[in-house]
Image (cartoon, rainbow, N blue to C red):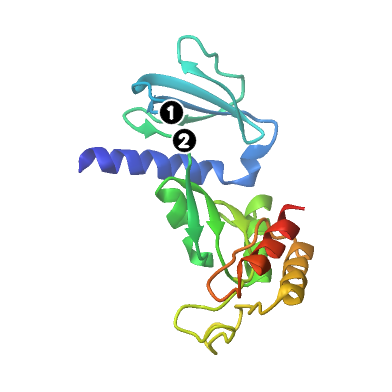
Amino acid sequence: MRRQKLIRLAIGSVLLALSSSSLYGQVAVVIEGGTVIDGTGGGPRADIRIVIRDGRIQAIGPAAQVSRPASARVIDATGKFIIPGLIDSHVHYFGYEGELYLNHGVTTVMSLGGIPEWDQTQAEAIARGDVVGPRMFTSGNPLGSPPGAPIGMPTLGMPHWLPVNDRQEAAQVVGMLLDKGVDYIKVYRGVPNAEVAKVMADLTHQ
């Protein structure tokens, strides 16, 4: 239990600190003293120094081999663990969840169905540093019919679902979402056949 708390503490303190847009300028950020588990299959590495500038890792290695830039902001991770940011590949994002994701090590989320304007506004605010949260990728409206609803007939409680009944509708809704700048398309149950699904997939890949 104590080990889990240490891991979460390290993740939370480091990610919340790095989420501030003021740290993405010319001043370097240095995380040092922690134990790194990098996910490559190697064992934990203790007393590692990580140098970050403009939101990207510039150097990582034993503290004795990686120098600390002058005027760097230093985050002491002694006794804590550092891991790569996790990706949650299926979320429905709510605005209050940003710090919750970061505190559990999730630095990227993929929203699979929501109101495009809401999701994209959140994603852009996070990217600017105006809001604390994980990097977001969005799909916009789900295409098809929601669970429990008659095929082609979204429920009143889920008006953001868009039914697709034929090739023409498929082309229209996919084109509309791509014009809004979504990152991918979510196709759900209720699409009439594989031919219609292929139209949607081909347009998205183009």
Q: Residue type at mark 1?
A: Asp
Q: Is residue 180 left or right of residue 73?
A: right
Asked whether residue 133 appears in the rendered view, the answer is: no
Q: Quadrant of residue 63?
A: top left
Q: Secondary structure at mark 2?
A: loop
* Residue 203 screen position, x and y as percent: 75, 59
Residue occupying the point 59% across, 46% down: 20
Residue occupying the point 61% across, 75% down: 192
Q: Is residue 121 left or right of residue 189?
A: right
Badge 2 or badge 1: first in the primary sequence: 1
Residue identified by numbered label 2? 84
Q: Are marks 2 and 1 in contact (CB under 8 Å)?
A: yes
Q: Give the label on residue 38, or none.
A: 1
Mark 2, residues whose alpha carbon is within 10 Å: few (<14), some, or many (≥20)?
few
* Residue 43 screen position, x and y as percent: 34, 21
Above or below residue 28? Residue 168 is below
Q: Quadrant of residue 112?
A: bottom right
